[in-house]
Amino acid sequence: MSIRKTVRSCVAVLKFLPLVALLYSGAALAQGDAEKVATAKPGDMRLFISNGLREPFKTVRAQAEKLVGKSFTVEYGASRGMQAQIEAGQAFDVAILTPDVIADMISKGKMVAGSSTDLAHVPVAIGVRGRAKIDIGTPAAMKAALLGARKVGFAAIGASKPTVDNMFAKLNVAEALKDKIVGTPPTNDTTPLPPDGQYDIVINLVSEILPLTGGWSYAGIVPQELQVPVIMSAGIGAQGNAADAHKLITFLQGPAIEAGLKANNMTR
């Protein structure tokens, strides 16, 4: 079975799983990065990029701008959060989001049909408060770590949510964790997770866990048998510059970004 079919099958099953109650305010969607597509300068290339590909993209941004011949205005965020802007009519050239969001936007005429291009796979990982070492190498160890945590954080609309639901269901811990769950703020280098002990384990895409500051450490990847595959894909905006978009997407398919992907434990 292809990875795309696996993703669709897992997501279809997860729709029937009980939802875990989350405390997640709308304010958490605000991004720390200053750039906003809505305020792009005339002539800039306008990009929506999922937090999942944020760190690798930053390593090649200058090279990509030189190749395309334009400055970029790049807005980072959760795929579902940026989907709302696209649906509201915000024009853009390229969006790098999860395949389900791109497919939805294509079906609604917001993105160019046939433009969806897979760029990378990113697993879900665990961050832990402080420098304590925790064992998450097996499902049993992962279960023990979750049950032993005082508070567990993850984003309610993030791309890691299907893995969280799948993991909680397979480990049968949703009921035990319901009073330990708190919503996370955006994870980027300008808004580190709070150091006040609000939670001591956070679950997110590995490329969002690795750069965390504020007293957090990388604990490792969630066991493979609990993962729901996450793909970062590129699509072209219906109102965008198709020629420039194709240049950028072709560049991101090439070798320049490989080092950035590897550094963030991502694969093609």
Image (cartoon, rainbow, N blue to C red):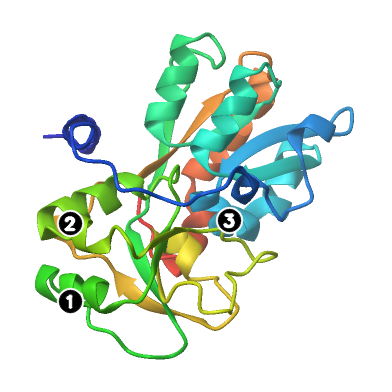
Q: Secondary structure at mark 3?
A: loop
Q: Secondary structure at mark 2?
A: helix
Q: Earlier in the sequence, mark 2 or mark 3?
A: 3
Q: Secondary structure at mark 1?
A: helix
The foreground one among 196 and 127 is 196
> Marks 1 and 3, how far apart in space?
26 Å
Q: Can residue 51 be seen in the rendering of this structure?
A: yes
Indicate left or right for 176 with 28 as reference. Answer: left
| Residue 144, disc | 1
> Marks 2 and 3, how far apart in space?
23 Å
The image shows a total of numbered marks equal to: 3
Indicate left or right for 141 with 179 as reference. Answer: left
Q: Nearer the viewer, mark 1 or mark 3?
A: 1
Q: Please provide percent x and percent y for residue 266.
A: 39, 58
Residue visible at 32% across and 89% down? 133
Which residue is under mark 3?
A: 186
Residue visible at 64% across and 26% down? 85
Residue 258, compared with residue 79, is above or below; it is below
Which residue is under mark 2?
A: 226
Q: Residue at the far front: name it.
A: 179
Q: Earlier in the sequence, mark 1 or mark 2?
A: 1
Circle 3 residues within 10 Å: few <14, some 14–19, many ≥20: many
Circle 2 residues within 10 Å: few <14, some 14–19, many ≥20: many
Q: Please provide percent x and percent y for residue 37.
A: 75, 34
Q: Nearer the viewer, mark 1 or mark 2?
A: 1
Q: Quadrant of residue 215?
A: bottom right
Q: Which amino acid type is marked by label 2? A: Leu
Circle 1 residues within 10 Å: few <14, some 14–19, many ≥20: some
> Marks 1 and 2, how far apart in space?
14 Å
Q: Please provide percent x and percent y for residue 203.
A: 38, 62
